[in-house]
């Protein structure tokens, strides 16, 4: 099950390609949000790699990505107008106001806005607001799948590091 209903990749096998893309994207959106399940605020903010990547930061970044690809690209509004950072790297940075609840809420809202923005579009419709130039919705969906899949993998590894006790060494 994904965030918007009972569709699973298996259940949409014979559905239109757009429905298949949306189902896979929603599955990855839900998976990334689920990386925060059962964690404390400290665990969600824990830095385990050299970059500022944290589990909470990954979900915050995914919110930025949603807004870039489904707000900026579709509406042609600037990042300043949308209220998002200029660069992807900045989108991982956490503030004191960021919590599991606030970041998840922003992510859910961004995903819902993305679905609404793309609802009436066809896969070959061109989105004119991206910095790369006009791109078809199909390309954006493929890019989102790649982006979300990468970050779900990052989240799996970070979560495993947080929840798995270090092996005991002893003589």
Image: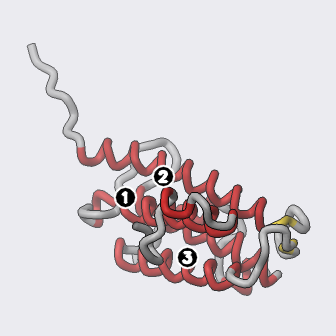
Q: Which secondary structure lies at badge 3?
A: helix
Q: Nearer the viewer, residue 23 or 41?
A: 23
Q: Nearer the viewer, residue 62 or 141?
A: 141
Residue under numbered circle 1:
35
Residue 58 seen by the camera: no
User: Which residue is most to the front?
Assistant: 14
Q: Where does the image place residue 151, in percent across and percent down from the top left?
A: 52, 52
User: Which residue is most to the right?
Assistant: 133
Q: Is residue 92 left or right of residue 40?
A: right
- Residue at the image point whose x is 23% and y is 41% from the top: 164
What sort of colour scheme is used for the picture?
A: secondary structure
Q: Where does the image place residue 5, in percent across and percent down from the top left?
A: 44, 76
Q: Which secondary structure lies at badge 1?
A: loop
Q: Is residue 53 above or below residue 97?
A: above
Q: Residues within 10 Å of mark 3 (few under 14, many from 20)?
A: many
Asked if the residues shown at circle 3 and circle 1 are in contact, with their CB atoms under 8 angstroms apart, the answer is: no
Residue under numbered circle 3:
111
Q: Determine the image quadrant of residue 124.
A: bottom right
- Residue at the image point whose x is 78% and y is 68% from the top: 123
Q: Where does the image place residue 148, in percent across and percent down from the top left?
A: 56, 56
Residue under numbered circle 2:
152
Q: Which label's residue is closer to the chain start, 3 or 1?
A: 1
- Residue at the image point whose x is 57% and y is 58% from the top: 13
Residue 73 - label: none
Q: Is residue 148 left or right of residue 137?
A: left
Q: Which label's residue is closer to the chain start, 3 or 2?
A: 3
Q: Nearer the viewer, residue 62 or 56?
A: 62
Asked if the residues shown at circle 1 and circle 2 are in contact, with their CB atoms under 8 angstroms apart, the answer is: yes
Q: Which label's residue is closer to the chain start, 1 or 2?
A: 1
Q: Nearer the viewer, residue 154 or 166?
A: 154
């Amino acid at each position: 099950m994904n965030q918007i209903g009972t569709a699973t990749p298996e259940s949409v096998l014979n559905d239109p390609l757009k429905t298949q893309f949306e189902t896979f994207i929603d599955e990855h959106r839900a998976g990334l949000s689920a990386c925060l399940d059962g964690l404390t605020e400290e665990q969600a903010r824990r830095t385990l790699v050299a970059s500022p990547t944290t589990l909470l930061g990954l979900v915050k970044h995914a919110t930025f990505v949603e807004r870039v690809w489904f707000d900026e690209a579709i509406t042609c509004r600037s990042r300043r107008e949308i209220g998002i950072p200029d660069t992807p790297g900045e989108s991982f940075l956490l503030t004191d106001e960021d919590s599991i609840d606030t970041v998840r809420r922003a992510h859910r809202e961004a995903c819902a806005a993305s679905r609404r923005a793309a609802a009436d579009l066809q896969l070959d419709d061109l989105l004119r607001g991206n910095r790369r130039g006009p791109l078809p919705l199909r390309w954006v969906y493929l890019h989102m799948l790649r982006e979300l899949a990468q970050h779900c993998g990052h989240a799996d590894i970070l979560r495993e590091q947080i929840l798995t006790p270090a092996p005991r060494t002893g003589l």
